[in-house]
Image (spheres, rainbow, N blue to C red):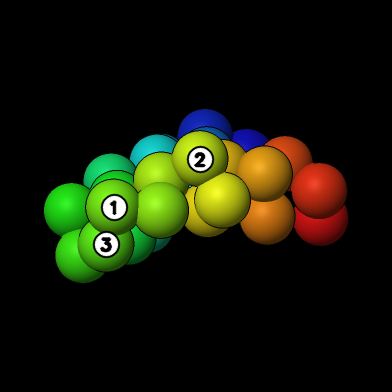
Amino acid sequence: MGRIVYAEACLLDYLTKLSDVDSYTVGLILGQ
């Protein structure tokens, strides 16, 4: 369980750095 949360955190951080649409990315992940 913790491993999944860690992976999502890393993925979110990566996507946030990759693009400036961090709010869209957060909404996309939270929406799933």
Residue projecting furthest to the right:
32
Whole-Å distance between the Cαs marked 2 and 1? 8 Å
Q: Amino acid at mark 1?
A: Asp
Residue 11 visible here: yes
Q: Nearer the viewer, residue 8 or 1?
A: 8
The residue carrying mark 2 is 23
Dot 3: element: loop
The image position of residue 21, as x and y in percent, is 40, 53
Whole-Å distance between the Cαs marked 1 and 3? 4 Å
Q: Nearer the viewer, residue 9 or 3?
A: 9
Q: How many marks?
A: 3
Tell me, yes or no, whether the two marked residues, 2 and 1, touch with CB atoms within 8 Å.
no
> In the image, what residue occupies the spot 81% across and 48% down?
31
Badge 2, how many Cα within 10 Å: few under 14, some, many 20+? few
Left or right of 26 on screen, residue 17 = left
Q: What label does residue 28 carry, if any?
A: none
> In the image, what residue occupies the spot 51% across and 40% down?
23
Residue 4 visible here: no
Dot 2: element: helix
Tell me, yes or no, whether the two marked residues, 1 and 3, touch with CB atoms within 8 Å.
yes
The image position of residue 12, as x and y in percent, is 39, 49
Left or right of 10 on screen, residue 2 = right
Q: Find residue 32 and report its image quarter.
A: bottom right
The image position of residue 1, as x and y in percent, is 62, 39
The residue carrying mark 1 is 20
Q: What label does residue 19 carry, if any?
A: 3
Q: Amino acid at mark 2?
A: Ser
Left or right of 5 on screen, residue 15 = left
Whole-Å distance between the Cαs marked 2 and 3? 10 Å
> In the image, what residue occupies the spot 41% across and 45% down?
22
Badge 3, how many Cα within 10 Å: few under 14, some, many 20+? few
